Image (spheres, rainbow, N blue to C red):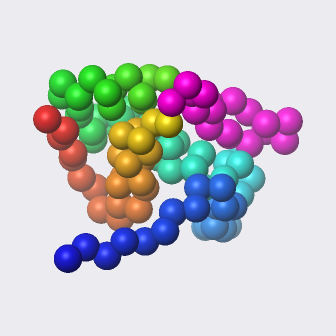
Amino acid sequence: GYNAIDFKGGRSPESNNPTEEKSKKDRFLNVNAEFYWRLRELFEQGKISIKKHNTLISQLTKIKYELTTSGKIKIVKPEDKSPDFADALMMLCAEQKQEFIMRFV
């Protein structure tokens, strides 16, 4: 009963409001970086709380970022194992249009 959509994290971010200081295309290497950055902001704003999900917490703490030579944010995932739980959370939160609070038990 659910509709699935494809996710292509390597694609370029879409242009956004031209009045913003820096466009998404100028700020992020790809959609993956844009959406993980959004997830980071949600945590910083206290809109997400994770309780006792050790795998998710472990995966999130292993994801890092770096700046490319052109100054764009690039996500660096751990090489040892795919962060499936972290990716799922990032994709879930990426397209949220309304303010929300999420609690993971």
Query: What residue span does the magenta drawing correspond to?
Result: 64-81
Residue that lies at the very extreme toward the front in this rendered image: 80
Residue at (36, 40) in percent of width and height: 85
Residue at (25, 73) in percent of width and height: 2
The mark total stands at: 0
**Quarter of the image where the C terminus is located:** top left
Residue at (19, 38) in percent of width and height: 104
Residue that lies at the very extreme toward the left in this rendered image: 105
Q: Is residue 42 visible?
A: no
Residue that lies at the very extreme toward the right in this rendered image: 69
Query: Where residue 7 sits in the image (x, y, percent)?
Result: 51, 63
Looking at the image, residue 89 lies above or below residue 53: below
Taking depth in this image into account, of 31 and 54 the one nearest to the observer is 54
Q: Is residue 104 visible?
A: yes
**Quarter of the image where the N terminus is located:** bottom left
Query: Where residue 62 sits in the image (x, y, percent)?
Result: 49, 23
Taking depth in this image into account, of 2 and 60 the one nearest to the observer is 2
Query: Where residue 82 sits in the image (x, y, percent)?
Result: 50, 36
Looking at the image, residue 68 lies above or below residue 99: above
Q: Indicate the quadrant where residue 53 lies.
A: top left
Q: Indicate the quadrant where residue 48 lies.
A: top left
Q: Is residue 16 left or right of residue 52?
A: right
Query: Where residue 11 sits in the image (x, y, percent)?
Result: 67, 61
Q: Is residue 102 left or right of residue 77?
A: left
> Is residue 21 covered in magenta?
no
Residue at (33, 31) in percent of width and height: 56
Looking at the image, residue 50 lies above or below residue 102: above
